[in-house]
Image: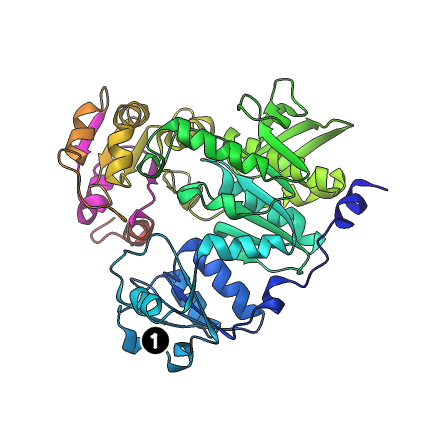
Amino acid sequence: MNKKDKYTSKIRKVLPFEKDLGWDFIYFIGIGGIGMSAIARYFAANGKQVAGYDKMPSQITKDLEAVGIEIHFEDNVKNIPISFLNKEKTLVVYTPAVPAGHTELNYFINNKFTILKRAAILGKITESTFCLAVAGTHGKTTTSAILGHIMKNEKATSFLGGIAENYDSNLILGGDKVSVVEADEFDRSFLQLSPNIACVTSMDADHLDIYGEAEALHESFFAFSQRVTDTLIVAKGLPLKGLTFAIDEEADYKAFHLKIENGAYIFDVQTPSEIIKNIKFHVPGKHNVMNALAALAMADVYGVSLENIKNRLSTFKGVKRRFTYKIKTPNFVLIDDYAHHPTEINAVENSVREMYPNEKVLVVFQPHLFSRTRDFINDFARSLSKFDEVLLLDIYPARELPIVGVTSDWLFSKIEGVHKKLTQKNNLVKDIKNSSAKVVVMLGAGDIGITINEVTHELLKPQENEV
């Protein structure tokens, strides 16, 4: 029996979760979230009636509306479609980012509807499928997207935390027996999953507003590892037991002979049983080679042939807002990235220097969360100081209230050795034009992802009075 047959023979003999549901209507509070929207799209594709609320319109909500999902943007019970007010037929799903005082959520609570967090629904799906789960404080979105792309030929359905360029979606819809999921450590959500094969890409301190200290975060990753029924794969050096992966050092899965040709990585991989040569991967950054290696290891353990994995890696286009080129000309480059943690900023800086070793680089950074800024203030300063120029925006609060003394001014004061400026979103175009940098990267997990579209549009406009 080969590896693939071995694992598919262990698929749980139960009906897929969506066919077991006793509810005809599923209502999402926070439907525009990247994780929520994938599940909403999944249930809509499986014939359920889906509707929801979100704080504001976005491209994600527009895409959901385009497939027939009704969405409103005012927190008011009167806006809930009447067919979703029957508690015997309606399941309510909410994200932990929704505030406790949310009117609609409290209506459903007070009227004793069945209410589940997003993680619980995803957990139910993984219970009834053979699940490949990708965890890690960094890299999990890209790794799960790569894995989902590889596993599409295996008829897996993949739930992603970002928009995969190949599919222009955070859901890769396949069959109902195999799932690929991004295992989110925030709010300990990944402890509700039932993974058969899993990997952990990283365990750097993050979400300390939830965990309090790094040790508690590590304990949650250990608890996640204990939920894996078959095979755990971990980046070499992490304090977990499993198959290891690494670049240019001994590991169960080792990438080596890395080189860059025409903007693509070419490398070889040694697995526990064989070597596959000349893998081509088009996503910039050595950290993304690590992500590709993790996905390769998971697919190999599942039983996908290395030749098929190699072919799929060569056609992977990346994830939106993960080193995404918005402008790419011989004289100017604008890059968009979700990086919002010092480790991620370092990875972007390394990637930019690798791709553009002789160019001046300007970073535009929007800090995300007061607590994260406070907890990693010195690390943020060191990471940003590696660039040639820094434009620093105000902190994006997301789910938090301000913390006294935690401001962008404080972070600004700690950035050393570079040309730097505190700025506002409406001044960015002028500030970028005033810089001599040929490479600009805009980083952050807040609304800078929307702002960059406006900046791109303005930078591409023909200049008046230009000769």
The percent position of residue 385, horizontal first and vertical second, equals 28, 24
Give the answer, above or below, for where 94 lies relative to 277: below
Check disc 1 and give the amino acid type: Ile
Front residue of this view, candidates 464 and 186:
186
Region of the chain picked out in magenta, as a range = 419-448
Side (left or right) of 392 relative to 171 = left
Can residue 317 be seen here? The reply is: no
Residue that carries the numbered disc 1 in the rendered image: 80
Task: Say whether residue 439 is magenta.
Answer: yes
When asked about the image quadrant of residue 275, the answer is top right
The percent position of residue 53, horizontal first and vertical second, equals 34, 67
The percent position of residue 46, horizontal first and vertical second, equals 58, 69
What residue sits 21% from the left and 26% below the top? 419
Give the answer, above or below, for where 344 lies relative to 17: above
Front residue of this view, candidates 286 and 2:
2
Side (left or right) of 301 relative to 382 = right
What residue sits 78% from the left and 27% below the top? 273
- Residue lying farthest to the bottom in this orientation: 82
Task: Say whether residue 153 is magenta.
Answer: no
What residue sits 22% from the left and 24% below the top? 415
| Circle 1 residues within 10 Å: few <14, some 14–19, many ≥20 | some
Give the answer, above or below, for where 238 lies relative to 103: above
